[in-house]
Image (cartoon, rainbow, N blue to C red):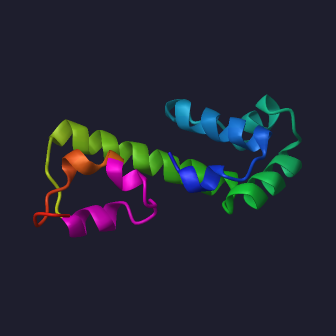
C-alpha cells in the first residue's frame, strides 16, 4: 500500500507491513506483530521506525484510515474532485494515486 516505505530491505519489517495491510480488519497489536516476526516489542518498534520512518502504531493508523476511505468511496460510488482527493489522501505518495483513478474527476488531461 505504501510502496515508498517498503524500499528499506528489512525482511522482518516488510513481513510485518504485509501482515498489517492484509489483517488490518483484525487490528493486530504492536506486541502481536513483534511476536509474529520473532522480535521483542522494543526491537520491533525501533527497527520499524528506522525502516519506515513511522512508529508501528502510526503506520497501523494510516493503513486503517486509507482502507476505510477506500471502502467508503466504493460504497458510495461517488466521483471525487481533485481537492477532495488531496484532502482525504494527503499521506499517499505518487503511485498510490493510480489506485484511486476511478474516483477522480478533474479537467481533461489530469
Residue at 43 percent across and 50 percent down: it is 65
Q: Is 105 part of what is drawn in magenta?
A: no
Q: Is 84 part of what is drawn in magenta?
A: yes
Residue at 84 percent across and 45 percent down: it is 41
Residue at 43 percent across and 60 percent down: it is 94
Picture coordinates of residue 1 (x, y %)? 50, 45
Q: Nearer the viewer, residue 54 or 25?
A: 54
Q: Nearer the viewer, residue 23 or 10?
A: 10
The image quarter in which residue 46 lies: bottom right
In the rendered view, does 61 fall on the left or right side of 56?
left
Q: How many marks?
A: 0
Residue farthest to the front, as pictured: 109
Picture coordinates of residue 79 (x, y %)? 14, 51
Q: Nearer the viewer, residue 37 or 82?
A: 82
Q: Quadrant of the C terminus?
A: bottom left
In the rendered view, does 34 fall on the left or right side of 40?
left
In the rendered view, tell whether residue 75 sits above or below residue 88: above
Residue at 43 percent across and 54 percent down: it is 95
Question: What stretch of residues is rendered in magenta?
Answer: 82-98
Picture coordinates of residue 75 (x, y %)? 21, 37
Picture coordinates of residue 35 (x, y %)? 81, 32
Amino acid at each position: 500500500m505504501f510502496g515508498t516505505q517498503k524500499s528499506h530491505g528489512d525482511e522482518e519489517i516488510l513481513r510485518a507491513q504485509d501482515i498489517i495491510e492484509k489483517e488490518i480488519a483484525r487490528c493486530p497489536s504492536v506486541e502481536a506483530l513483534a511476536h509474529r516476526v520473532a522480535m521483542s516489542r522494543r526491537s520491533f518498534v525501533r527497527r520499524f521506525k528506522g525502516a519506515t520512518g513511522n512508529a508501528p502504531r502510526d503506520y497501523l493508523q494510516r493503513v486503517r484510515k486509507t482502507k476505510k476511505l477506500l471502502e467508503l468511496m466504493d460504497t458510495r460510488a461517488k466521483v471525487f474532485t481533485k481537492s477532495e482527493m488531496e484532502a482525504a489522501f494527503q499521506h499517499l505518495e505518487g503511485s498510490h494515486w493510480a489506485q484511486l483513478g476511478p474516483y477522480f474527476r478533474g479537467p481533461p488531461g489530469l
